[in-house]
Image (cartoon, rainbow, N blue to C red):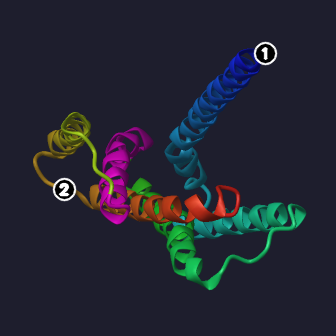
Amino acid sequence: MIYRAFCFTMHDQTMNTHTHIWRGMIYGFIGMACFSLTAPFTRLALQGFSPYFITAGRVSIAGVLAALILYLRREHWPARVYWKRLVMVSLGVSVGFPLSLGIALTHTDASHAGIVLAILPLLTSILGAISHQEKHGKSFWLIAVSGCLSVLAYIFWNSGIRLVAADLWLLLAAISAAIAYSAGASVTRTLGGINT
């Protein structure tokens, strides 16, 4: 009887783990799909608005929606110890990334921006490993660096072995987002995803 109860409990925990893994993968896929549309939709918006106006609009809409969600969930203000990191997240994701991307897209097309922004996962991994003192295996770094080198090879091949202004703005966008993602990851461990 005890063995049977143990097996059912273990089965439930395994099912829960599998459900969480699949749910996380689905959310990750949806997030990736949405993020992949950032450059094309920003480029489209630039036909009628300035990068500054688009950034202000994104900040305003995101801020109102975040405040509404936090109000409806009756969340409390985070402790002061988290404010510095939360400001880093806000500035990087809400201002640094979209403004730099918008300025870059006034000089290049969305497909070029999408390829250059492929450097973002490597930058996030590096900053995350440094700030969280995480150790990754050699194969992780080999694959990450080879991906980064592929992006840099594309940039140099496409621009004739020189960085153009758009590439510098795109790199600044990627650095802003990577800093924000790394800061957000550390705060999320304590506050949870919805509060970050």
Measured as percent of width and height from the top left, residue 186 is found at: 49, 63
| Amino acid type at mark 1 | Met
Is residue 70 positioned above or below 167 on the image? below
View extreme (front): residue: 1
Magenta part mainly helix, strand or loop?
helix
Q: Quadrant of residue 17?
A: top right
Q: Is residue 85 shown in magenta?
A: no
The quarter of the picture where the C terminus appears is: bottom right
The quarter of the picture where the N terminus appears is: top right
Residue that carries the numbered disc 2 in the rendered image = 163
Whichever of callouts 1 and 2 sits on the residue coming sooner in the sequence is: 1
Report, in whole angstroms, how far the alpha carbon at label 1 lies from the one at label 2.
Answer: 70 Å
Helix, strand or loop status at disc 2:
loop
Measured as percent of width and height from the top left, residue 119 is found at: 31, 47
Q: Residues within 10 Å of mark 1 (few under 14, many from 20)?
A: few
Side of 125 where 76 appears, left or right? right
Helix, strand or loop status at disc 1:
loop
Q: Residues within 10 Å of mark 2 (few under 14, many from 20)?
A: few
Side of 144 where 33 appears, left or right? right
The residues colored magenta run 109-133
Is residue 11 positioned above or below 189 on the image? above
Measured as percent of width and height from the top left, residue 97 is found at: 47, 62
Measured as percent of width and height from the top left, residue 77 is found at: 74, 77
Is residue 124 positioned above or below 6 on the image? below
Residue that carries the numbered disc 1 in the rendered image = 1
